[in-house]
Structure formats: C-alpha cells, structure tokens
Image: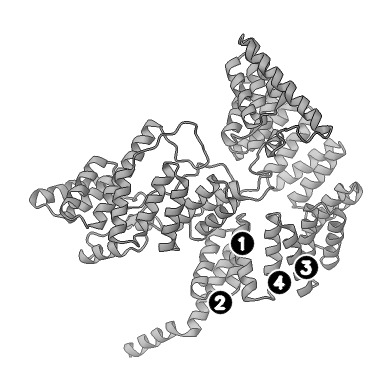
Amino acid sequence: MRTIIATFFILLAASPLFAQWNTRNLLRMGQNALYFDDYVSAIDNFNNIVRVKPYLSEPYFFRGLAKLNLDDNEGALQDFSQAIALNPNYFQAYLYRGVAYSNLHRFEEAMQDFDEVVKLDPAVAYAYAYRGITEAEMGKYKEAEADYSKALMLDKELLIAYLNRAIVREKLDNWEGAMADCNTAIRQNMFSEEAFGLRGYLYYEKKDYHNAIEDFNRALKVNPRNLRILMSRAMVWYEMKEYPQTMADYNEIIRIDSNYIYAYYNRAMLRAEVGETNAAIRDLDKVVEMNPDNILIYFNRGLLKMEIKDWYGAYDDFSESLRLYPDFVQAYLARAAVAEELEREEDARDDRIAAWEVMERYKKMKEGDRNALVDTSANLRRLIDINAREDEVRDVINGRVQDKRAIIELQDVFYVQYLSLDSLRSGKVQYYDKHVMDYNQKHNYRPSITVSNHRPNYPEGFADKNIRQLTERLAVGDTLDIRLLRGSFYLTENAFPEAIDDFAAIVAKEPDNLLAVFNLANARVMMYDYIESVDDMTSRVVGERTEETRKVDYSLAVEGYNKCLQLDPGFVFAWFNIGNVHAKNGEIDKAIEAYTQAIRQDPELAEAYFNRGLLFIYAGQKAQANADLSKAGELGIITAYNVIKRYCRQTD
C-alpha cells in the first residue's frame, strides 16, 4: 500500500496540474510581496516563474512593477515591453510602461503608450491621469488639466488626479481652483499627507504662513518622517523669522536621514545668518562630502572661511569653484580679495583681470558676437543645483532599499574557502563550479569547499582551531589536500604569507591544480589590498576620483588567473577577478572586457553585472550602467537599486 501511495504522490508532483498550482502560488506570493512593498522578494518570486515559464506575460508585468517602485525605470521598461510582446492587448503593461518612459523623460513614447491604453479601454481613469502628469512635465498645462478632468469624470475619487490638477491649476494662476481640488482631496481622505502638504504650499504661495504651518502640522501628524514636508515647514518658519523652529526642523530632518543634503545646506545658511560660522562650515563640509561637484558650496564655504580669516582655506575653495566653472566672475573677485590678504598682489591682479575678461565676453555674447567664447555648459546649473545628481529626494521604502548616500564598492574577488553550515545559513554564498564539485565528491563532502566572495560566517575561534588541527596532520604526513584547506583558512584570517606558502607548495608539486593556482593568485590580490587599505593609499570607491593614486603590481596574480584560464577557459571566477584587478588599477576598459567575458561564461553572475555597472557609471555611460545594475538587482544584489537611485535616474 505504501508503494502505491508513494507512486501516486510522485505522479501528482510531476503532473501539469501541480506545475500550474505551483506557478499560481509563486505569482500570488510575488503579488503579496508587492502589496507589502517588499519589492526585492517580489522580484525573486517572479524570477522563478520566468525561468520555468518564460512564455507567460504576467510575471514580466509584475516584476516590472517591482522594478518601477525601486526606481529601476530601465529594467521596468524591459519587463513591460516583454509582457506586451507576449500579450499585445495587455493594457496595464502599456500603462506602466508609459510611466517608466515618463520617468526617463522619454515623453513622446510615454504619450504613445497612454494613447494605446485609451484605445484598448477608454474607461481607464489612470491612463488620463498619467497622461496628464506627462503633459505637465512637458509644460502642456492646459492639456494636462483636461486629462485630469477626464480622469475624474471616470473616477470621482481618484486622489492622484485632484492633487495633480491642483498643481497645474496653480501653474495656470488658478489659485482658487487649485485650492478647491486640495479641499476635495482632503474631504475624501483626511489622512492624505500629500493633500495637506500641497494645500500648505498653496497657502505659502499666498504668504498665508499661519495656515501653511497648520497644514504642514496636520500632514506631519500623519507621517512625522515626511522629509519634504518638514523641509517645507522649515521654509515657512524661516519666512516668519522663527529661526529656532527653523533650526529644529533641519535638525529633525538630519536625525531622520543623516544624508539629506538639502537640510545640511539650508542649516549651514541659517547658521551663517545667525553668526554660527564654524558650525555652518562643518555643515558645508558634509555637503561637499556628499556632492563634491557643486560650485556654489565651495564658493559659500570660501566666504565663511573669510569671516574667520582662514585665508588659505578660502583661497582653495574659490579655486575649486573656478576649476569646476572657469567663468565664475564672483569667485575670481573673491579670490582676488583673499590674495590681497595673503599679500599676493600679482595673483589678485590676475584674478581681477580674469573677472573683467569674462564680463566683457558675456557682454559681447549678449550683443550677438559668436566669437565670444563663454562657458555656458551644464556646469553653470550647479551654481543653483544643490544636488546635481538628483533634483528630488524620494521617501525610503520601508527601509528595504534606501535612497541615501552610501559607500559604493566593487563586489569582492571570489576565492576558495571551507563551506560551513553557518555560511549556508547566512544567505547565498556559492555558485556551482565543476572543479569544486569534483573536489567535494572526491572527499565525500568531508570536508566541503566552495567558491565565494563573501567572508565566511565561522563561529569564533573556528578557523584557528582548524588551522591547528590541520598543522598537526601535516606533521604526520604532508598531503596537498590538507594544505589547500589550511591555506584557505589562512586566507580567511588575513594570514596572507602563510596562505601563499601553502598554495605555492601545492602548485610546485601539481602545476595544474586549478584551485591551488586560483587561491595563490587570490592570496596575493587580497594581501596587496589589505596593505593598501592599511596605508590608505588607494580607494576602492567607484566615483571618488582622487588626484593621486598609485597602481599596484598585480602581475603575479594576473599570471595566476591566466593560468587558470589556460587550464579551463570557462572558469568564470578567474575572469571576474581579473576584472577586479584592472578596476582597482583604473584600467576601466580592460576591466569591463573581463567582466563581459565572465558574463558570457555565466549569464547569472550577479556580481559581474554589478561591477561592470559601476564602471559604466565611472565612464559616464548611464544607460549601460542602468541595464547592468538592473540585472544585478534582479539576480539578488539589492544594493544595485541604491546605485540606480543615486546615479542612474533620468533628470536631464
């Protein structure tokens, strides 16, 4: 009887009915994750369906929604397009692809998608609302107002239409109509922080500061962590000359988000106004750290340093402003004044002459002289743009993906290490590799090794204990397997010379031992990096370009990786690690090519997409960077979405 029952369950598990139920279950789990704003888990569920049933349109659509909520507009665009290719009548996919296009400022394509939704189903209110948002972005306020009104005819409770119509009505100087829309939105939802915030802004525009403060207070009762509304309230307090309340709001914003650049800048300006010059300089130091390309910050900090008679510091700040924008007249004049204080009369005279020449060129340019060359590049925008990378700050999504400044580093090199149960519990730590598999099968998985680029999560003292035991075993009889294992433990403990000795001993006896050759190269790379980090000589942070960097001689390591590729041209981890070596030495093109080779060998290698994406950012290739980071995020590296938010959002 047991045999019959067991067979029955095996057949059920293999049946199409079971497969269909499993797909629906995964789809429902992904949709639930979307509902609870857990977008990364949602993507993981939809990935599983796509792998098994790539002909279904729904998982692509829902995965696109998850990416859209993570600001991965390029990735969302690809998924919505795939859903449409599989189902040309999928009007929801057209709708949200239009949103992705609009977010990328590809407005004409967005309008085409919204028009397509209306053709497929003229009763979709959101199609008119989103089309109105795009028209407003294009400056077509009357058309946008008409579309919002059409959306409200179809759905009288569509809050997004009321709020956006209020915005365009304010731009069309219809303040009463805008206020009426806000009032309607508030009547519909007394807990809408957006409605109270927008009405507060309308009161502020009319200089009705008391009512503006009241509305901002109501919005903050709903969500005390709404940074935009806190910033707006601080702005009103400032207009009312209530400086303690203004300062309190800036302090609260920074307490909530220690990387909110606008709060630091505004607090610096307020501190300067009330005479707290040194504190203001410290705030501007923080702003420069977050955005080192901003001209206005250096200029203002230079003025503050002049107040405390830090002449050399002021001179350097004005010089940095001029390096970023060579036609900054005020910076020339300010630097001239500082040069006089430093008794550098010739430098002061040169700066005043330079300022006069720029003003003359501007004058000629305005008179129509095409030969009057003036730097009117995008650099000028940074004079008024506090955050040149991102002109708005979006709310943190439940802490899962943070829209904050973060240290963004390359994913580390892969190396052979002992695999423990604790390592497995810490998450995804390994990829399949035939060489590792052969080793583990040969030893009946006792011990078991893996290839990972994460530090193993061993219990305290675990590595030291194993090193002692393996050393005792080597005293009895030297075997290469024991040396491989001990060397791997040495590597995880940063005992690089000892690790190198073990791996080199193996290679001396077995030159074709790929795992030993690989880890010998890794030990050298990791040792060089460790020494460099201690000496603070190089930076691994992508995007932080230093004036003085020193190349490290990784030639022996590269030679080892190339030997691995001679033994096995498909050994993906060697390609990846070669990419890292080139990236650390600033050889961007070579690094990108190595990562590309790694991806060709394994299209699921998330770390290769991530690192290549960072290098594309460094090279200024935003579209390629976004595509790679989107793929890395899809494959499980959730920090990729942080990078997309910070560097890849379309703001031009």
In the rendering, which numbered label is found on residue 115? 3
Q: Label 3 sits on what residue type?
A: Asp
Q: Secondary structure at mark 2?
A: loop
Vertical order, 370 against 321 (above or below)? below
Which residue does the numbered mark 1 point to in the structure image? 76
**In whole angstroms, how far apart are the C-alphas of marks 2 and 3?**
26 Å
Q: Residue at x 83, y 57 (%)?
A: 144
Closer to the camera in the image, 143 or 112? 112
Mark 4 is surrounded, within 10 Å at the Cα level, by few (under 14), some (14 to 19) or many (20 or more) other residues, namely: many
N-terminal label among 3 and 1: 1
Most extreme residue toward the top, as rendered? 343
Q: Residue at x 28, y 62 (%)?
A: 435
**In whole angstroms, how far apart are the C-alphas of marks 3 and 1?**
19 Å
Left or right: 566 as drawn, with respect to 641: left
N-terminal label among 2 and 4: 2
Q: Are marks 1 and 2 in contact (CB under 8 Å)?
A: no
